[in-house]
Amino acid sequence: MAKGHRSQIKRARNANKDTRPSAKLSYARMSVQKACYVLDVIRGKDVQTALGILTYNPRYASSVIKKLLESAIANAENNNGMSLENLYVAECYANKAPTMKRIRPRAQGRAYRIEKRTSHISIVLDER
């Protein structure tokens, strides 16, 4: 059993909340592997460099992640009052989301399963 009353436990859990600016995209229509190719490139880079990389990257995931990064930058400027010059990508990761299962008709009445994978993508910024 947990120690303390439920409100005390919640208060303690919320006390150590991460205050870094972030943005999260849930149920993105791409697999985790495809998103991670792009996320690995921008991890640890400053924001201007990351935006440049995402702008000229030919992958589909880069356009989605660019929008998400711009949202995280806007959160940092408006909510936390941080300046754009000092920001860098502290964390970025993609987690597995539910998979949509579809059917592909095949010969002689058979059916093959198609799995349309989705992912949850998160970007966390920080100041240098």
Image (cartoon, rainbow, N blue to C red):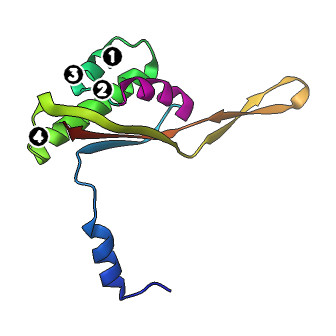
How far across and how far down the image is residue 86, in percent? 15, 32
State the predominant SS element of the stretch in magenta: helix
Q: CA distance from mark 2 to mark 4?
A: 17 Å
If you read the primary sequence from the N terminus, does the residue marked by circle 1 or circle 2 appear first? 2
Q: Which residues, given as a range, are shown in magenta?
A: 32-43
Q: CA distance from mark 2 to mark 3?
A: 8 Å
Q: Are marks 2 and 4 in contact (CB under 8 Å)?
A: no
If you read the primary sequence from the N terminus, does the residue marked by circle 1 or circle 4 appear first? 1
Q: Amino acid at mark 3?
A: Gln
Q: Amino acid at mark 2?
A: Lys
Q: Residues within 10 Å of mark 4 (few under 14, many from 20)?
A: some
Q: Which residue is mark 1?
A: 53
Say whether residue 6 is visible: yes
Q: Residue at x 19, y 36 (%)?
A: 128
Compared across the picture, whether 27 is left or right of 82 comes to right
Camera-side residue of 54 and 25? 54
Q: Amino acid at mark 1?
A: Ile
Q: CA distance from mark 4 to mark 3?
A: 14 Å
Q: Is residue 117 magenta?
A: no
How far across and how far down the image is residue 122, in percent? 38, 41
Camera-side residue of 83 and 68? 83
How far across and how far down the image is residue 50, in percent? 29, 22
Q: Residue at x 53, y 38 (%)?
A: 118
Residue 78's place in the image compared with 40, above or below, is below
Q: Which residue is mark 2?
A: 45
Q: Secondary structure at mark 4?
A: loop
If you read the primary sequence from the N terminus, does the residue marked by circle 2 or circle 4 appear first? 2
Camera-side residue of 126 and 24? 126
Q: Which residue is mark 4?
A: 82
Disc number lying in front (2 or 4): 2
Question: Which numbered marker is on residue 48?
Answer: 3
